Image (cartoon, rainbow, N blue to C red):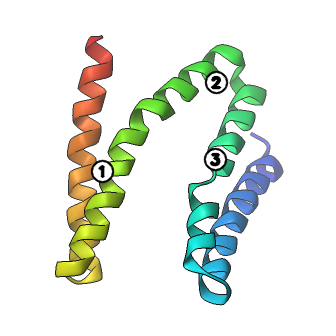
Amino acid sequence: MDYLYTLLKFVVGGSIIVGVTLLVEHADPRYGGILAAAPMITTLAFLFTYSEAGRQATQQLVISTFWFMIPMLLFLLAFWFLMERFSLLLGLGGAYGIWIGATLIMNRIITTV
C-alpha cells in the first residue's frame, strides 16, 4: 500500500470540506452549498477508483452513486425539516435514521432488479 498516495486522497478530500466551511463562514451559505453539492468528491472517487480498479469498477461505482443519491436527497430534506423542530443532534439523528432506512430500501431495490 502506498501511504503517501492514501494521504494525498485524505488531504484533497479534507480540503474540500475546509473550503465549504470557509465559504459558509466568510461569504454566503449558498456558495458553501454549491461547493458541497458539486460533484468534486465523487469525481475524485471516480478518478481514484479508475486508476486503482479500472473501468468496470468505476462504471459500477457511477451507477451506484446515482441510485444512492435518492437516499441522500431524503437525508437533506429530513435534516432541513427536523432542524426547525428539534436540536441539531436530534435533527441529525432523525435524518440519519431516514437515510439508513432509505439506503436499505434502495439497496434491496437495485439488488433485486
Q: Position of residue 42 (x, y in %)?
A: 62, 43
Label 1: few (<14), some (14–19) or many (≥20) C-alpha neighbours in 10 Å: some
Which residue is depicted at the point 20% across and 64% down? Answer: 94
Q: Position of residue 98 (x, y in %)?
A: 21, 52
When asked about the image quadrant of residue 20, the answer is: bottom right
Label 3: few (<14), some (14–19) or many (≥20) C-alpha neighbours in 10 Å: few
Which residue is depicted at the point 31% across and 69% down? Answer: 80
Pointer 1 residue? 74
When asked about the image quadrant of residue 62, the answer is: top right
Pointer 2 residue? 58
Tell me the quadrant of the picture where the N terminus can be found.
top right
Pointer 3 residue? 39
Q: Nearer the viewer, mark 3 or mark 2?
A: 3
Which residue is depicted at the point 68% across and 58% down? Answer: 13
Q: Position of residue 5 (x, y in %)?
A: 80, 47
First in sequence: mark 1 vs mark 2:
2
- Gap in angstroms between the C-alphas marked 1 and 3: 18 Å
Q: Nearer the viewer, mark 1 or mark 2?
A: 1
- In terms of depth relative to the viewer, which is nearer, 59 or 57? 59
Q: Is residue 14 left or right of residue 109?
A: right
Q: Describe the element under mark 2 as helix, strand or loop.
A: helix
